């Protein structure tokens, strides 16, 4: 791999790429703000058509919708709705820690659907957004959710953390010991620690150079209070409010036909996705994208969109 200079937190901002901007300009679009518990969120709707709208839940927690913009290619036959969750991107970002919780985020999904008149949707969640989608449906809020798409997904944060430990062991040159030593010494803010974290991200989060959409998302993540409160200081140190979340025993509450996607090198390991496939009561299938890691929709957007299009259009 070529050497890159990006970080998951604190990247310089960037505007939309020319290709993404051109696609957006070609499709009907609208945008605005909607009131949700705790403040206002920003939403963007692209495309039209009479097929069931695709509602997307971005990851983080604390990123923004920007990295999901490759999905606007699907707007040629159905509306695709993106939104920045509270504390993210162009949404309000209250500083009080108690504002941010899984339950408030679940209620936010209902508020967005009500504000935009989304009685029927295909619901897509990526990473934290997949956690949110699973929790939403396990709470019995799935009325009008025709189908479900889960990417880089999980049913349990403890299972994710166990997977991280296995990935740590695959890192070269005593990586895990070095990270542990620096963390124990309180040197998480040093260039050495940042370089080690970046090595993990380059292998398991994003394996291609970042596009402007991704950079804009990482900039949002660096500013968001939600990431620190809900997740923690980095991808593999989950010590925030979501650390004990586990819905493995409740997956039979999900009856929707489901597509689960992951990358060959996803930081959320394959067993997490297999747990979802095997536990969901509705017909669920798993697709593994070779050569990809966590941000599959950015690494191979055409292949990712083809998977989604086929799934949403099949009988």
Image (cartoon, rainbow, N blue to C red):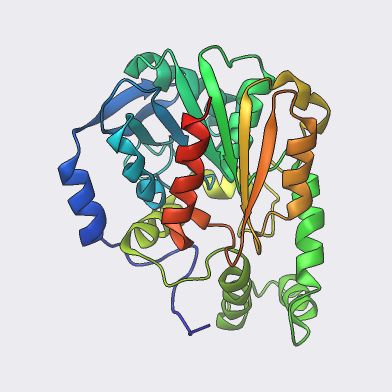
Relative placement, left or right, of 165 versus 131 is: right
Q: Residue at x 81, y 73 (%)?
A: 169
User: Residue 44 at what x, y percent from top left?
Assistant: 29, 34
The structure residue drawn at horizontal position 80% and vertical position 46%, both measured from the top left corner, is 158
- Give above or below for 85 relative to 239: above
200 or 233, which lies in front?
A: 200
Instruction: Give me the residue at 52% from left, 57% from top.
Output: 295
Would you say 207 lies left or right of 86 here? Answer: right
Q: Position of residue 273 (x, y in %)?
A: 72, 45
Confirm whether residue 16 shows in the render: no
**Number of numbered discs visible in the structure rendering:** 0
Snapshot quadrant of residue 151: top right
Q: Residue at x 53, y 48 (%)?
A: 60
Residue 177 at what x, y percent from top left?
80, 79
Q: Residue furthest bottom?
A: 173
User: Relative to residue 156, is residue 145 drawn left or right?
Assistant: left
**Horizontal relation, residue 242 to residue 39: left or right:** right
- Most extreme residue toward the front is 315
- Which residue occupies the foreground of this view, 100 or 67? 67
Residue 80 seen in render? yes
When the figure is inspected, residue 169 is found, relative to residue 31, above or below; the finding is below
Give the quadrant of residue 163.
bottom right
Expressed as whole percent of the image width and height from the top left, the position of residue 234 reads: 61, 60
């Amino acid at each position: 791999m070529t050497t890159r200079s990006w970080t998951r937190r604190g990247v310089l901002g960037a505007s939309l790429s020319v290709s993404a901007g051109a696609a957006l300009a070609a499709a009907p679009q609208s945008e605005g703000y909607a009131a949700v518990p705790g403040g206002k969120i920003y939403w963007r709707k692209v495309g039209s058509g009479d097929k069931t709208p695709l509602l997307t839940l971005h990851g983080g927690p604390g990123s923004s919708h920007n990295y999901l913009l490759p999905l606007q290619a699907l707007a040629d036959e159905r509306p695709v709705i993106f939104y920045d969750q509270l504390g993210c991107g162009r949404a309000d970002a209250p500083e009080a820690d108690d504002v941010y919780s899984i339950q408030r985020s679940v209620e936010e999904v209902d508020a967005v659907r009500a504000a935009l008149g989304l009685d029927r949707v295909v619901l897509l969640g990526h990473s934290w957004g997949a956690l949110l989608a699973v929790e939403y449906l396990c709470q019995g809020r799935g009325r009008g959710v025709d189908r479900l798409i889960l990417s880089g997904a999980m049913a349990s944060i403890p299972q994710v953390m166990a997977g991280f430990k296995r990935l740590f062991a695959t890192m070269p040159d005593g990586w895990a010991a070095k990270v542990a030593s620096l963390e124990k010494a309180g040197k998480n803010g040093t260039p050495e620690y940042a370089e080690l974290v970046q090595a993990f991200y380059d292998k398991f989060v994003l394996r291609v150079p970042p596009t402007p959409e991704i950079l804009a998302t990482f900039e949002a993540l660096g500013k968001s209070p939600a990431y620190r409160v809900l997740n923690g200081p980095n991808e593999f140190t989950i010590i925030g409010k979501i650390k004990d979340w586990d819905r493995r025993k409740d997956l039979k509450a999900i009856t929707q036909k489901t597509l689960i996607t992951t990358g060959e090198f996803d930081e959320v390991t394959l067993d997490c996705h297999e747990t979802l496939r095997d536990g969901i009561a509705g017909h669920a299938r798993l697709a593994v994208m070779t050569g990809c890691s966590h941000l599959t929709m950015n690494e191979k957007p055409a292949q990712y969109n083809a998977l989604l299009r086929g799934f949403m259009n099949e009988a």
